[in-house]
Image (cartoon, rainbow, N blue to C red):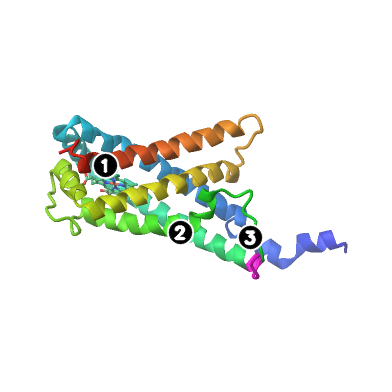
Amino acid sequence: MSSAATAVASPSSVETGFFDSAIGKKVVMAITGCFLFVFVIGHMIGNLQIYQGAEKINAYAHMLKSIPALLWGMRIALLVSVILHLTMAIQLTLLKRKARPVAYVKKQSIASSYASRTMIWSGPILGAFIVYHLLHFTTGQAHPEFSETDVYRNVIVGFRNVPAAGFYIVAMLMLGMHLFHGVWSMFQSLGINHPRYTPWFKLFAAVASYGLMAGNISIPVSVMLGILN
Ligand code: HEM
């Protein structure tokens, strides 16, 4: 039997399913990442209503909570996506390490951007941010004057605390970088790649990620400057 035929028929390759392969894991990361990306864009558009006043954003928050099936459906989908995204990230890191147990003597970082090299720690910082954010604005344990109904006041009082506002700003800088690399990788993993359109995909990833970062950062900054009060 030729070596090629042996490789095709070897038990390990027959047993290895799509989701055990690096590409399968990357596709799961791309799909869950895409969903999380759509959520953060929608969430930012909702948050920017704060510039239209308390009534507007409080009515919007009330509307979201008034449809429990939608709220809980969304929460479950977000939780499942975050768990899958994280699990795939850990498994891919371990696979990469197994493939190259001895690190490069000299790390070649020419082709990788700053954003891609920081995925490994922008991910965990974002994880910590999400936990804090939920305790701050959703359940209220990390908020000094939490109100169930007045989302506007929660945001204003929350961001008057400079360390809290600072942490949001740092987390949003991380999110911008994480998304820029993530959106770009998503196109690669899903095979959406064409020499003519690639620069446009990159431009889309940059505008969406850094636009989201700027929109979100504007809120704590506006509170600290007294523009929102
Ligand atoms: C400066 C930026 C942000 C602001 C001002 C903000 C504001 C808020 C507020 C006020 C709530 C509570 C809404 C309500 O109770 O009706 C909330 C919930 C939430 N936010 Fe944010 N958010 C920001 C960024 C983010 C980011 C970047 C993420 C994800 C990475 C995120 C994920 C969530 C989640 C998952 C919820 C809970 C939704 C739920 O199940 O009730 N937020 N946010």
**What type is the residue that disc 2 sits on?**
Trp
Q: Are marks 1 and 2 in contact (CB under 8 Å)?
A: no
Image spot of residue 66 (x, y percent): 19, 40
Q: What residue sits right under mark 1 in the picture?
A: 221
Going by the image, does 214 lie left or right of 2? left
Q: Earlier along the polypeptide chain: callout 1 or callout 2? A: 2
Q: What residue sits right under mark 3 in the picture?
A: 107
Locate the C terminus by quadrant: top left
**What type is the residue that disc 3 sits on?**
Lys
Going by the image, does 12 lie left or right of 221? right
Q: Which residues are magenta?
A: 98-104
- Residue found 31% across the figure and 35% down from its top: 45
SS state under label 3:
loop
- Residue found 54% across the figure and 44% down from its top: 186
Question: Quick check: is 138 in the magenta stretch?
Answer: no
**What type is the residue that disc 1 sits on?**
Val
Q: Residue extending furthest right?
A: 1
Q: What residue sits right under mark 2 in the picture?
A: 121
Q: Classify 145 as above or below 99.
A: above
Question: Quick check: is 100 in the magenta stretch?
Answer: yes
SS state under label 1:
helix
Q: Nearer the viewer, residue 180 or 141?
A: 180
Cα separation, mark 2 vs mark 3, equals: 18 Å
Q: Classify 91 as above or below 26.
A: below
Q: Earlier along the polypeptide chain: callout 2 or callout 3? A: 3
Going by the image, does 10 lie left or right of 180? right
Cα separation, mark 1 vs mark 3, equals: 37 Å
- Nearer mark to the viewer, of 1 and 2: 1
Image spot of residue 215 (x, y percent): 33, 37
